[in-house]
Image (cartoon, helix red, strand yellow):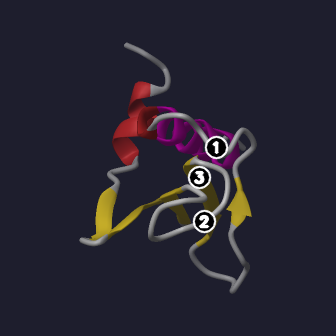
Amino acid sequence: MNENYDFLMALQFHHVLENLDLWSATSEGFSFVISYGDHAGPGFSGRAGYLASWRPVYGGRGAIKIIGSPFSTFDEAEAACGAMLKHLTSN
């Protein structure tokens, strides 16, 4: 079985708002968000692509961008979130 498969399955992203490209997932005490933005369209502005970030569910900390963001595809952003979850929980 693919080692990353278990962590990707642990993160079940859901679309947060119908008119906004924003997805979130929570697992193991961490919250992950993927948003899509570009410099020309409505919604989030900035470099085009999928921005992935994480933060602890508790503790009041701001979100931390996952290295490599923005990603070209949602699947790449989702995989990066899975890898970050694995890193955060590998103690």
The residue positioned 69% from the left and 86% from the top of the image is 60
Q: Residues within 10 Å of mark 3 (few under 14, many from 20)?
A: many
Image coords of residue 1 (percent x, y): 37, 13
Q: Is residue 22 left or right of residue 53?
A: left
- In the rendered structure, find residue 45 and report the number of the disc placed on it: 2
Q: Up-down: is 1 above or below 30?
A: above
Marks 3 and 1, Cα distance to the nearest angstrom? 10 Å
Of 32 and 6, which appears nearest the observer?
Answer: 32
- In the rendered structure, find residue 60 and report the number of the disc placed on it: none
Marks 1 and 2, Cα distance to the nearest angstrom? 24 Å
Callout 3 touching callout 1 (CB < 8 Å): yes
How many labels sit on residues? Answer: 3
Q: Residues within 10 Å of mark 1 (few under 14, many from 20)?
A: some
Q: Nearer the viewer, mark 3 or mark 1?
A: 3
SS label for mark 1:
helix
Residue type, mark 3 in image: Ala
Residue 28 makes an appearance in the image: no
Callout 3 touching callout 2 (CB < 8 Å): no
Marks 3 and 2, Cα distance to the nearest angstrom? 14 Å
Q: Is residue 6 magenta?
A: no
- Residue range corresponding to the magenta coloring: 76-89
Q: Which residue is mark 1?
A: 84
> What secondary structure predominates along the stretch shown in magenta?
helix
The residue positioned 60% from the left and 59% from the top of the image is 39
Q: Up-down: is 46 above or below 48?
A: below
Q: Which residue is mark 3?
A: 52
Q: Which tag, 1 or 2, sits closer to the chain's start?
A: 2
